[in-house]
Image (cartoon, rainbow, N blue to C red):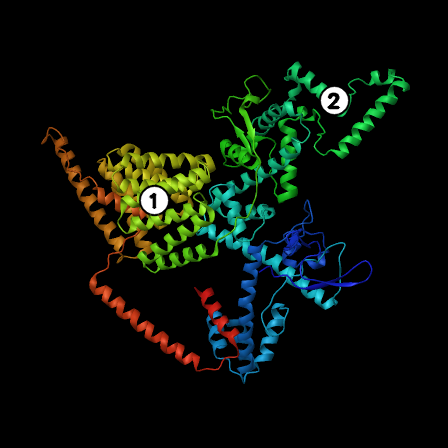
Amino acid sequence: MLKIKPHSIKTEKGDVVELLTAVECKGIVGNDGRHYLLDLLRMMPPDLNYLPVDVEHISPAMKQFDYPKTHKHRLCCLRQELIDAFIEQKYVDFYRSIALNLSKLRSTESSTANDTTQQTNVEEAKRIVNEISVEDNSREIIQSACRSIGSVKDNEFDVRFNPDLFQPHVTLSQTPAETAADIKLLKEAAEYLVLKQIPLMIQDFQDHSAVPVDGESLSEAMHSRGINIRYLGRVAQLLNQQSSLYYIYDIAVTEILCRSAKHVFRSYTQSVPLHLLSFSISHFLNCFLTIITSPSSEYLSDEFLSSSSSSTLTNNGPINTNSSLTNVTNSSSQKPTNKKKNKKHQQRKQNPFIRNESLDFLSLTSKTLWLQLTNEAKSRYNFDLNCDDIENFLEKYNVRRTCILRSFCSKTGLQLSIREYQFDLANKSTRTNNECFNEEDIINIYPLIKQVPPKPSDAYQFFTTGQQKIQQGLLREGFELISEAHNLLNNVYGPMHPEISMCLRLLARLNYIMGDYQEALYTQHKAVMMSERVLGIDHPQTATEYIHMALYSFANGHSINASKLLCRARYIILACCGENHPQISLIDSNLGLILQSYGDYENALKFMEKSLELNKKFYGLKSLKVALSHHLCARIQSCRGDFRSALNSEREAYQIYKLQLGDEHERTRESAQVLQHLTEQAVVLQKRMNDVVKGQLLMIPSITIQQPSFQNVLEMLNVVNGILFIQIREKDLDLLREELAKQSIDDQQQQASISSIKTISETAEQAAALMDNEVD
């Protein structure tokens, strides 16, 4: 699992010691007789991109990005997720190499061999590997493939890393060739991180398969792909190159700013006197989120200063406020004072809980703070903020001040009082009594504990199997497996855990799809309560739970409650990332449909037009989501009697459907029918208006406008939220069963023919399975 290579090192006495772990790792036997491992800091291979190594160890492709870079420490290691992805890629390359060598061996002409070497893909490699027989010099082929991918063994796939490479006080006892092979493998892993894994994540963002809402979700997306946070600057640079991902770029820049502020704040509070801690934190927040040009010592009361001076006298000795006083004192009076200082200094060394308190924090201003933040962002994340204060930052990046405050408080553990913070009223030139933050706003500072929770393997297996059954259309079997996973998670984690909330959300979705709306609402209500309790009332996942609960509430006839839930979800997303986000577009579409259902057409049209505007930014002008938004706007405009605007909106939807899906598609035909109906209504209205103008009619008679039914609105809500019910006729179902039966017979025959062929080993069969996974 850890992929650690057994290696040998030389001690100071010249003895050779074989290690199975990193050199810092210690093994002890406890008093209970059990064995323990300690100091597991370097169990993962080091990150070559952030180590002070020679330039010759860096590939030319990485030199273009100015690697290697300096970091605050030498404990930069690769993550387990990256190692797993890298090993999987090496596994594919291993069997592709086998297929290429076989194709070379069997080809009769060298030119054919060269063409085959360049053009062999995964499917071709799978076919060739399945046809390997014993007579094909299999041992030489496998050995060549092992050498090409850097396997430790020469007869099977086994890629391992040496964790003690580039350690300054470690002498490896191995040949130069082995060391060069270890460095080459480490270099390839570092290249894979920057050149493959980060672009793949950006591609997932473009495909909207992963949509981070705040800095925490962005960090989780990076960690799930094995990307360390120190690469956040590189991620931001790539996001800036994609115009459709500007909202994630703003999230990344905000995360860089808040993490840099966290590091500065941590060192800032180390020397603050405890009785001035609340005042110092409020002063830091004022310098961070407003503009403070003068030091705060001018506005600190004399009582605070006197108490601080007495505290400093008792803890650190007297303060030399006047140099002339020190000149007047004689040498006889200095001797006992020096003795007291030395005694205090010795006590401070012995007791680490004594603080080095000072009043240096009083000299902090917005300019000095933002200079520190800029340097911190550059040194840790290699990103240039180029901002002198918060106003400059807000002008340059589309970020709300409340989003920065929320992110900073969640990272530092600050608890502030709930009130309306008037940032705009704070004086931007000089500090006055009308400041934004004061010491009474600071309620508490709580510790942040990072941990890796255990993952129950049985429950995880049930959950993944249930998801596969659901994808195959076996909803009842999938529901039973997810329920079993939910029971196991309750036994392992207890009644409250984010994984249990995820199971409840999926169970509610299955109940809704199977038609049990009341049970879906009841289960989703439990998921909402658990998410609020475990993750927090302002967490983006809680907003997602609100959106699901709003859909189920509307299905049960509670349209007013559904609109309230959506407004709450919208407020949470605004607090997390602002208004420019795909989640806001989804919420506005739901709100527009629900408001339309009970006749509030004005507000419904506002929300729907906002959703259309956001969809154009995120998905493009000719995407299907934009076409759906045009169609929904046309529905609301027709209900208002504005047939001209409805006709224009539906015409846009029809053109997009025709371009993307063709003339014969079902959506294109439905849009054409709606367009024809709106045209007829517009013609009738225009004729009657002409009759009024000519004097044939005294007033425009009312036109009968058909209001959307409850079932029709519910169907559109399902489409917006990604739930599609496919109606299959019985004749089509019989044809589908016959096709599946025929396909199963063909698969059995193919397996029988493959089993008759002698393969080189079981490894080749594993290769075929791996190739299938990559093709899928």
- Quarter of the picture containing the N terminus is bottom right
Residue type at mark 1?
A: Thr
State whether residue 295 is above or below residue 652. Answer: above
State whether residue 643 is above or below residue 46. Answer: above
Q: Residue at x 66, y 26 (%)?
A: 364
Residue 478 — which label? none
Category of crowding for the residue at label 2, using alpha-carbon neighbours closer than 10 angstroms: few (below 14), some (14–19), many (at least 20): few
- Quarter of the picture containing the C terminus is bottom left
Q: Residue at x 69, y 47 (%)?
A: 70
From the top left corner, tell me how far across and down residue 531 is, in percent: 42, 41
> Going by the image, does 309 lie left or right of 370?
right
Q: Which residue is mark 1?
A: 523
Quick one: SS at disc 1? helix
Residue type at mark 2?
A: Thr
> Going by the image, does 339 lie left or right of 444?
right
Question: Image quarter for residue 102?
Answer: bottom right
Q: Residue at x 21, y 36 (%)?
A: 641
Does the image show residue 386? no
From the top left corner, tell me how far across and down residue 311 is, in percent: 71, 21
Between the C-alphas of marks 2 and 1, the distance is 60 Å
State whether residue 13 is above or below residue 391. Answer: below
Q: Which residue is mark 2?
A: 314
| Sequence-wise first label, 2 or 1 | 2
